[in-house]
Amino acid sequence: MNQEILLKKRPTGKPSLKDFEFADIEKPKPKDGEILLRTKFVSVDPYLRGRMRDEESYIPPFKVGEPIESGIIAEVVESNNKNFKKGEFVNGMLQWKKFQTSNGNGLNKVDNEKAPLKAYLGVLGLTGMTAYLGLKKIGKIQKGETLLVSGAAGAVGSIVGQIGKIKGCKVVGVAGTDEKIERITEKFGFDEGINYKTTKDMKKAIEKACPDGVDVYFDNVGGEMLDAALPNMNRYGRIINCGAISLYNETETQTGPRVEQYLIKNSLTMQGFIVRDYVKDFGPAQKRLAQWMEEDKLNYLETTVEGFENIPKAFLDLFEGKNKGKMIVVV
């Protein structure tokens, strides 16, 4: 039996289960040069919300009535391709299907003896690459600097903070519950945490937590959080715009404080960041992340949800903050 999950209609505001549709389909047979894949682990990520809009972006939008895709770990169950063997595992952008065929393009083999398979969707996958390369390429993080991280308890943010500590920085994280603040300080080694939901004045809270100012701000949230961080940036500070989850479900264009005065006054650099812009650096980045894991310098958390039928629900839970670290569905 085979199933797929389609985008039934484009969401208005916050997505719901009604925006997805399940369909029973035939299990495909691999042609010459193809492999048959069985989905094992599915990554669900906030950026998928942007692909549900009918607008141009750095990656094409999903089409209504067609399968959704994301990062997936799959097992090769049949192979007519000399480059892949039955029983091997691969990682790549694949469709939300239990079984599918591929010619192998865009797939990378993963070794389940070196690390758990799920890690290749998280700390050793695009999540870890995003944290490492964002700090390296745009943040240019240096020992002794102050690093501020929003979405600090999330998959990317928690790794960003740990890399900051490895690099010898003071690290302050922003998250939405006291439990998450305790997690980032106790498990991930952040120096301080700010609960934005119980803080009335984020600008002052950041100023108090970062008395020497902020040198690098890794932004996963956008919106009012960015507004509060900008006045606290040091001269020549760097702002990495990685995500804007606070705005993803807005139906109207949001406005806020003007950024020009801060950018000009303090000669700030603010740059949007897409990890695939640095695909040539993935190999060395993964090697360094794996080394830190082996040295017990890098910890990670996963929230796992069981069942192919629960993929849409797991995606929706991201916007409720129900994940601890990387959200992964086990099929």
Image (tube, grey):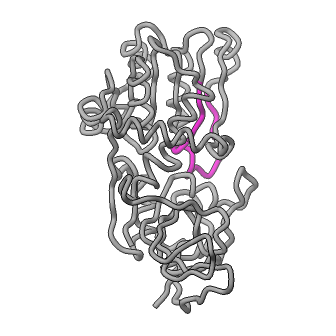
- At 45% across and 33% down in the image, what residue appears? 160
- At 67% across and 17% down in the image, what residue appears? 263
Front position in the image: 254 or 280: 280
Q: Report the quarter where the C terminus lies.
A: bottom left
Total labels: the figure holds: 0
Q: In this view, does 231 lie above or below 132?
A: above
Residue 137 relative to residue 188: left or right: right
Residue 37 relative to residue 251: left or right: left
- The reply to whether residue 253 is in sight is no
Is residue 207 in the magenta section? no
- At 52% across and 77% down in the image, what residue appears? 37
Q: Position of residue 7 (x, y in %)?
A: 59, 72
- At 65% across and 16% down in the image, what residue appears? 268
Q: Position of residue 88 (x, y in %)?
A: 47, 70
Q: Residue 166's quadrant in the figure? A: top left
Q: Is residue 228 above or below residue 307?
A: above
Front position in the image: 233 or 43: 43
Q: In this view, does 238 lie above or below 46?
A: above
Q: Position of residue 123 (x, y in %)?
A: 43, 46
Is residue 241 in the magenta section? yes
Residue lying furthest right: 56
Front position in the image: 134 or 108: 108
Magenta region, residue range: 239-256
